[in-house]
Image (cartoon, rainbow, N blue to C red):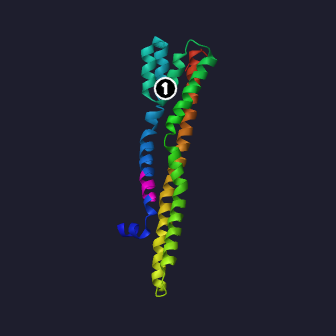
Amino acid sequence: MFAIIQGAGWPIWPLILASIIALAIIGERGWSLRRALVAPADLLPKVVAEFRQNGASAEMVDRVAAHSPLGEVLAAGLRNVRSSREVMKGSIEETGRGVAMQLERYLTTLGTIAGMAPLLGLFGTVIGMIEIFGAQSAAGTPAQLAQGISIALYNTAFGLIVAIPSMIAYRHYRAQVDAYVVDMELQAVKLVEVVHGERLA
C-alpha cells in the first residue's frame, strides 16, 4: 500500500487528507444524528403532561431546552406560552432555524470533499502523465510506459474511492436532517395547539 502511495506521487496526499476528514465527519455525524439524541419520540408527551400538571416553570423550560435539539424548539414555545399563537410559533421558527443549522454542521465540508475528490484524483493523474511522458527516453519500453500510466491512474481511482462514500453519506445525512426538521416542526405545532386548547394531545 505504501508503495502505491509513493508511486502515485505527491498529488495523492491531499486526497489522503480529504479521506481522513471525510471519515471523521461521517463518524461524528453518524453519532450526533441519532434519533434518540435529536428528536426523542417520548419527549413531547412528557412535556405536555408536565405542562398540564405544573405549568411552564423556568426550571422546566431550561431542563427541556438542555434535553435535545427538539427540546430546544419546544422550550422556545414554552418561554412564550402566555403570548399569542403567532408569537409562540414565531419564536419556535427562529429557534428551529438555529437548530437546523446545528444539525447540518460539517455537511457542507463533506459535500465539498465528495465533489472535489474526483477532481483531485484527475489532477494527480494528469501530473503523473506529464511526468511520465516528459521523462520517457528513447530507450523506454512499452511495458515501462504502461506501468507508469497505471501508477498515474492510482490517483483517479483513489479520488473515486474517497468521493463515492462521501457523496452517499452526504446525501443520507442531508435527508436525515430534513426529516428531523419536519418532525420537529410537526411536534412544535402540536405543542402550540395543546397550549392554546385546540387539541387534547
Nearer to us in this view, 195 or 86: 86
Percent across and percent down for residue 95 are: 54, 26
Residue drawn at the location 56% of the way across and 31% of the way down: 97
Q: Count the numbered circles shown.
A: 1
Percent across and percent down for residue 182 are: 58, 34
Above or below 150: residue 43: above
Percent across and percent down for residue 2 are: 35, 66
Residue drawn at the location 59% of the way across and 26% of the way down: 93
Q: Which residues are magenta?
A: 14-20
Q: Secondary structure at mark 1?
A: helix
For residue 60, which quarter of the picture? top left
Queried whether the magenta region covers residue 16, the answer comes back as: yes
Residue 52 visible in the shown view? yes
Q: Quadrant of the C terminus?
A: top right
Provide the residue designation for mark 1: 72
Q: Residue furthest left?
A: 2
Queried whether the magenta region covers residue 118, the answer comes back as: no
Amino acid at circle 1:
Glu
Q: Main secondary structure of the magenta part?
A: helix
Above or below 148: residue 105: above
For residue 28, which quarter of the picture? top left
Mark 1, other Cα within 10 Å: few <14 / some 14–19 / many ≥20: many
Nearer to us in this view, 193 or 94: 94
Nearer to us in this view, 25 or 48: 25
Percent across and percent down for residue 103 are: 50, 37
Q: Quadrant of the N terminus?
A: bottom left
Residue 199 visible in the shown view? no
Above or below 101: residue 57: above
